[in-house]
Image (cartoon, helix red, strand yellow):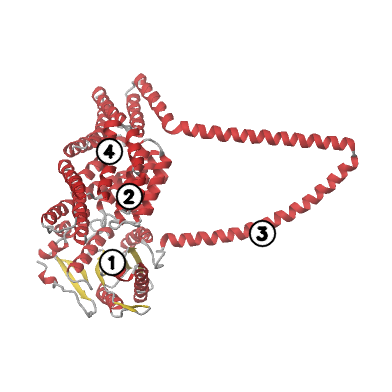
Amino acid sequence: MSQLDAIQSLSDRNNEEGLQQLLEFKKNLPADTSPAIRLEVLSVLGGLYFDAGNRKLSTQTLEEFDQLAKQMQDQDALLYLEIFETYSIFEKSGYAVAVAHLEKLGNAVATSKNTNVQFRYLATLGAFYSSNLKFDLALKQYLDMLKLSEQLPRRQLQAKMATWSQISGLYLQMKDPQKALSATTEALAISSASLAPKSFIDISVSRGVALSTLKRNDEALKEYENALKTAKVEKLPYWAALALFNIADQYLIKKDYKRAESYAREAMARSEGLEDQWGIASARVNLGLALGYQGKLKQGGDLVKESIAFFEKANAKSDVETIIGELSQMYEAAGLYKEALEQVRAQQKLSDEIFQSDRAKSVAALQEGFDAEQRKRQIEILAKDNALKDADIKNHRLQQMVALLASLVGVLAGCFIYTQYRRSKKLNEQLKEVNLQLEFHAIRDALTGLHNRRSFISLMANRNQRVETERREGSYRNPDCMILMDIDHFKNINDTWGHAVGDVVLKEVAARLKAVVRDDDMVMRWGGEEFLIYSPKSNPEQITSLVDRVLRTIGDTAFAHGNLAIPVTVTAGFIAVPFSDVPEEFCDWERALQIADMALYLGKTHGRNRAYGLSRLLVPHELALPILTHDLAEAITQNMVEMIEVLGPEQAHPHQSTPLSELK
C-alpha cells in the first residue's frame, strides 16, 4: 500500500509517469498478493486511465475490477460496484429509478466498515440530489463527506478538496456565488497546486466560475488560465478540456468572440478525443454562441439547441436554464426579438420550476402564519380596549388603580431593562471572547497550537506585497527560507502505541520546533505528520545550520511518554524563495514548496533522518525549471542544480541509506 500511495502521489504531479509506474507495479505483483490490494490497484488504475483521456482502457479496468470482486466475493468491492452502477441505471431508466437504487443501498453502506465505500456513496447520492435540485439533501451529503474524509485510510487531503469543490458547485447551482467562492477558499487552505494538482485544477475552475458570476471577469480568466497551465504541465487532458471550455466561456463574457471560438474548438477537439459526451455538449454551446455573435446565427443556434437537447435528456435542469438564457441574449443582440422572447419565456418557466415554486410556498406559508398572528393580536387588543371601557364606565376608581399600576409597571420595566442591559453587556463580552477563540482556531492547529495552512496562505499574500515593495525600494536582500519536514515512520508509532501516543509525539515535535527557531520565524503544522518552518529574510549561509539544529532537536533525545522512550526522527526538504535569484514570476513560493517537497521525498528514499536542500542552479532557469519542478532526481542527474545534504543524529538502528552521489 505504501508503494501504491507513492505512485498515486506521483500521478498527482505527473499522470503519465504515474500511470507507467502503476502498470509496471501491477505487472510485478507477487502471486500471493491479497485481493484487497489487487482491487485497490485496479481502482486507482481506472482513475488514471480516465485522467489520461483513455476511457476505453478505463472501462476495461473497471470490468476487470468487477470480475475480480465477484470471483473473490468481496462484499465492499461489490457494494462499490453497485454504487457505480447507478450511473448506468440513470442512462437507461432515468433519475427516479437511479435514486431509488441508491437509496436502497443505504442500509448496506451504513453497516459497511469501509470508509471509502461510504465516501463514494455520499458523493454519488449528493450528485444525484444536486442534479434534481434537492439542494438541502445534496448539501447534507457533502457535509457528511467532509466529516468522513478525516477517517479515510488514504488521500484525505484530495478527498477534502474534492468535497469542497462539490459544495462550491452546489452553491453556484443555488445562485449564491459568494458562498461558492468561500468554499473554494476553504479548499485552497487545505492544499496547493504543488501538492495536489488535480484537485487544485478542479478548485481553480470552480473559483473561476464563482468570480465570473460576481462580475470579477479578469480574476476569473486568470483562475482558468492557471488551471489550464497546470493541466498541460501535469499531462491531464480531461482537466485541460475543462479549463479550455471555461476560458472560452469567459471570452464570450468579454465579447471577444474570435478567441471564444478558438478556445471552444480546442475544448471540443479534446473532449472528442476523450469521448466525453458532457464535455462535447458543453464546448458545443460556447462554439455555437461564439459563431452566433459573429453573425452565423443559424449555425450557432443549431449547435446550442443540439446541446440543450442533450442536457434535457440528462435531466440537467440548471444547465438547461443557464444555456437557454445565453441563447436568448444572443438572439436579442442580433435583433431577433421574437426568437429571444421565446427563449426568455422558456427560461422563466424553467427558472420558476427550479428556484421559485418551493420558495413561493414557503413564503406564502410564512406570510399566512404572520397574518394570522397579526389578526389574533388585533382581536386581543380590541377585547382589552373594550374591557377597559366597560370598566371605566362601571367604576372610575378602577381607572385610578389602573393608572397607579401602570406607574408601578413602568418602574418595574425600568428595573427589568437595566437588568437586561447588564446581562446583554456580559453576553457581549462573552461573545467577544468566543469570537477571539474562533479567530484563533481559524488560523491555528487544534492539537499543537501551531499556525495552520490557512494562516500561511494568508501570510504569503501579504509577503508578495512586501517583496514587491522592497524590490521597488531596492532594499530586498536576504531571501525567505522554507523547510518542509515529515516525521519518519509515524504510522508505525500510531500502530505500535496507539493514536493517543501519536498525538503526544505531534505536540512534542511542535514544542521542540518552536524552541529552535527565531521569534520572527513561523512554525506550522502543514497536515498530518508534516510540519513547515517559514524563516523570512534568512541569511543563506545560516540555513544549513538551522536545518541541522532541527534534525538534532528532534532526533537527539527520544520522546518520553510514561515508561516509553520513543525514538523520533524527521526527514526534510528546504529551499530559499526567491530561489537562486530566479524571478518569482517563474518560480513563486508554491513552486518552490513543490521542489522542497520533492527534496523531502528524495530524503525518504535515501534512508530518512536527513534533509536535502537546493543551494543554487548550475544552468539558466529556462532550462532547469521545466525539469526541476517535476523530476528533481533527473535535474540532479543532469547536473542542473547544486544540492546540500544534512544528516540527522545517528540512531541505534539506522536505516540503510544511499549517498546522494549514487542517485544515478
Real-space CA distance between mark 4 and mark 3, rounded to the nearest whole angstrom: 60 Å
Figure label count: 4
Q: In percent of the image, x 36 and y 44: which residue is there?
A: 106
Q: In percent of the image, x 37 and y 71: which residue is there?
A: 504
Q: In percent of the image, x 21 and y 43: which residue is there?
A: 238
Which disc, if any, is residue 87? 4
> Quick one: quadrant of the C terminus?
bottom left
Snapshot quadrant of residue 415: bottom right
- Of the two numbered discs 4 and 1 on the same chain, state the one appearing first in sequence: 4
Give the number of the mark in front: 4 or 3. 4
Amino acid identity at mark 1: Lys
- Of the two numbered discs 1 and 3 on the same chain, state the one appearing first in sequence: 3
How crowded pointer 1 is (Cα within 10 Å; few <14, some 14-19, many 20+) is rated as few
Q: Is residue 460 left or right of residue 618?
A: right
Q: Is residue 222 above or below residue 315?
A: below
Residue behind mark 3: 422
Please tell me whether mark 4 sits on a helix, a strand or a loop.
helix
Q: Is residue 423 left or right of residue 224?
A: right
Residue behind mark 1: 491
